[in-house]
Amino acid sequence: MTSFSVSAPAKINLFLHVGAKRPDGFHALQSLVAFTEAGDELSFAPGDGVSLDIGGPFGKGLSAGEDNLIVRAARALGTSQGAKIVLTKNLPVASGIGGGSADCAATLRGLSKLWNLGKDSLALQKVGEELGSDVPVCITSRPQWMEGRGEILTELPSLPPLSIVLVNPGVGVPTGKVFGALKERRGVELPLPPYFTGADHLIGYLKSTSNDLEAPARMIAPEVNAVLEAIAGEGALLSRMSGSGATCFGLFATETDAKAAAEALKAAHAGWWVMPSRLLSTLV
Ligand SMILES: C[C@](O)(CO)[C@H](O)COP(=O)(O)OP(=O)(O)OC[C@H]1O[C@@H](n2ccc(N)nc2=O)[C@H](O)[C@@H]1O
Ligand SMILES: Nc1ncnc2c1ncn2[C@@H]1O[C@H](COP(=O)(O)OP(=O)(O)OP(=O)(O)O)[C@@H](O)[C@H]1O
């Protein structure tokens, strides 16, 4: 087999409610998770041993050693076969949009194909569970209802088409620290979301929810306040933080609106990472 590419789309928690801390130290969650066209890219080719090369705008400083989630994913598959893996790191690291988890999931998909392991999504999600709470949801990169610590997944019908702008102020926030600073939480009592008949329906639903990690992340990284204010100021239908931050997002009805907002945000905040994109509603 020659080389092939696999996308690792950014994960967006459209909302994120947190419940009690479980005996294993993880919190119970409820989240509506979607993915964007924007993401990292990985390529896979046959090789001797497992090797990883990293490039791309956020590749600098990211270790390509045994602690990289890509190498950990390769080891977790438990075979002695080799692979030459190249990562183009387009997403900021430790930023709430699951970049590491998306890379990890894309590696499980890519190596399952390269090595002919014949593992379906469910089997890969099971392997991914051990590697991080966000890895299972990133296996299919389709809209999902996420519960448990992230391992209980219900696939949802396509979401209405929406454009999105991702904004990161350049501060990394460790996920564990944000959970540790959590004071108020909405709990995990919501029923499965309804079928969304259009963008207005989805936005209305999202407005009745929240990201419980936003308050603690604002304390740890006050830059999040400025980012959310700036996105709202560009007329987003909804502005919110994703995951444990610090990346925030704005939802827009059209690609033109999202691109215009992104240009304005870039012009006003030279140090911020600003990425216009679209929500994915089908398998990548
Ligand atoms: C916040 C989310 O991004 C929402 O999608 C995820 O729950 C985080 O997933 P992740 O980055 O894969 O996080 P993990 O590497 O599994 O966990 C990092 C740390 O976050 C805390 N953590 C994570 C997930 C969870 N359900 N409860 C937690 O309390 C734990 O302290 C854990 O040690
Ligand atoms: N391939 C990788 N890409 C990004 N981070 C990686 C990778 N491998 C290991 N890591 C480590 O994993 C940690 C979390 O990275 P990640 O980008 O998944 O966080 P996140 O976006 O905050 O995730 P979440 O939305 O799940 O909270 C970082 O501290 C980083 O050093």
Image: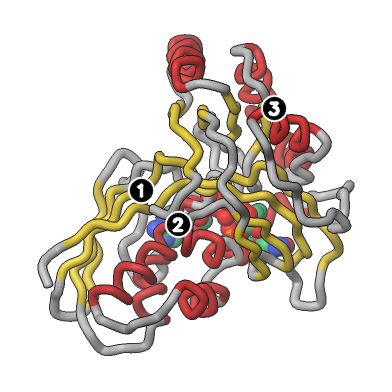
Q: Crowding at label 1, few (<14), some or many (≥20) Cα neighbours within 10 Å?
A: many
Q: Which residue is mark 3?
A: 200
Q: Quadrant of residue 105?
A: bottom left
Q: Residue at x 56, y 61 (%)?
A: 137
Q: Which residue is mark 2?
A: 102
Tell whether circle 1 marks a residue whose Cβ is less than 8 angstroms from ligand 2.
yes
Query: Label 1's element?
Result: strand
Q: Which residue is mark 1?
A: 40
- As rendered, which of 34 and 135 lies closer to the eye? 34
Q: Is residue 147 above or below residue 119?
A: above
Mark positioned earlier in the residue sequence (2 or 1):
1
Marks 1 and 2: in contact by CB < 8 Å? yes
Whole-percent x and y of residue 217? 71, 40
- As rendered, which of 277 and 57 lies closer to the eye? 277
- As rendered, which of 7 and 246 lies closer to the eye? 7
Total tally of numbered discs in the picture: 3
